[in-house]
Amino acid sequence: MKYPHGSLPGEVTGTHVHIPKDSWWLLRNDPGFGKEWKSASLKAPYRIAKSAITRGLSKDQVITVLRIWHMKHGHPVFEDDLERTYFAAADYAAPFVYKHEADEYWEEIRRIQGDPNARLHSKLRVAYFLMNTEQATANEISEKTGIPLKTVRNSILALKDSGKVVMPEFGVYRALQSSHWDWATLVGTVEDGYVLEDDPVMTCWWGQTVNERHRHKNGAVQMDCYDYCRDKTVTVIYTADQQFRSVLPHPDESEWVITEAGEVVENGTGHRFISVFPEFESWDIVGHRNGDRLDFRRGNLEAVGQKVAATVNDEEVDFFGRLCANCP
């Protein structure tokens, strides 16, 4: 490569940009790219463009790589041809890029939701809060979510860096609405290519109110809870006049979400919704008579057993081994 990191000699077109070394490293480790880079065939640019797009290069960077390939093999450079090559490759490769990013995103969402104390859990909650409000200040987010102000600000900085949050005016933040992350399903075409599914399984819930409640005439309360892992809203039912533990925060003041296991827990602490009812102790195994784990009406709950603490027989413990392990 004669001009891998600089510009072309003479008059430089505006789309010729610097290609970082890490981008070249990714391209060189793609066997398909290496083969086409050495080839002088005019079919090579299309395959080179596909490799570059799937490795995260921007449009200008892809066109720069194509321009360098033409100069390397002595082919004339026609800017219109480079543009057409890029868009043709993008039609094929872009869905794979979106799918990869979506898969990474949802894998991280499930990991964080599975551990309410995860380091990025606050970032997730701040992002979800901004998705469901027009705009807010850091102080407002802290008051509504109960997250410390310093943590909220750090989360906002991380969300801004990833392009998910903008600051329309000083101190005020707004989420950027986009379904880009949710296009995780590809559909094959007649031309043996792939396109994004029109109705993806996972969609953003913009404008959703956290734990919105509706009271019905039959005395039941329907509470809408967000399921992070499946990106959908589910309905939790409990009796309107059910008693709650006085030592715990009132459920109406907490944010309840659904875990990957399908349990209703308090966001950020992991406390199970069943723990707010005084008739059950922490060691009780609570069952749902109708089999619906989201139905917490008084008549549907029953204690089906008790959790037994694991016991250890002293004869099975290697005390000598422990002692030796603690010796300097």
Image (spheres, helix red, strand yellow):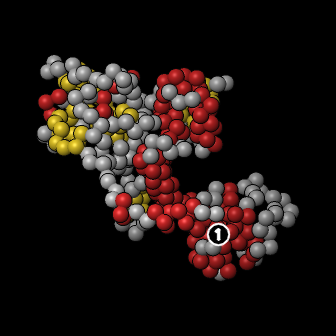
Lateral position of residue 104 relative to residue 8, left or right: left
Image quadrant in which you'd find residue 299: top left
The amino acid type found where label 1 is placed reads Leu
Against 214, is 158 above or below?
below
**Residue at x 63%, y 42% (from the top left corner):** 161
Q: Quadrant of the C terminus?
A: bottom right
Q: Position of residue 246 (x, y in %)?
A: 33, 21
Q: Residues within 10 Å of mark 1 (few under 14, many from 20)?
A: many
Q: Quadrant of the N terminus?
A: bottom right
- Residue placed under numbered mark 1 in the picture: 27
Q: Is residue 220 left or right of residue 327?
A: left
Q: Secondary structure at mark 1?
A: helix
Report x, y in % for residue 109.
Answer: 45, 47
Count up the numbered dots: 1
Q: Position of residue 208 (x, y in %)?
A: 39, 30
Q: Is residue 252 visible?
A: no
| Residue at x-position 54% and y-position 26% | 142
State left or right for residue 274 relative to residue 40: left
Which one is in front, 115 or 283?
283
Residue reaching furthest to the right: 10
Rendered position, 33 above or below 262: below
Above or below: residue 248 compared with residue 71: above
Q: In the rendering, at what x and y percent does residue 231 appear?
A: 38, 43
Image vertical order of residue 140 relative to residue 5, above or below: above
Where residue 80 sits, quadrant-wise, is bottom right
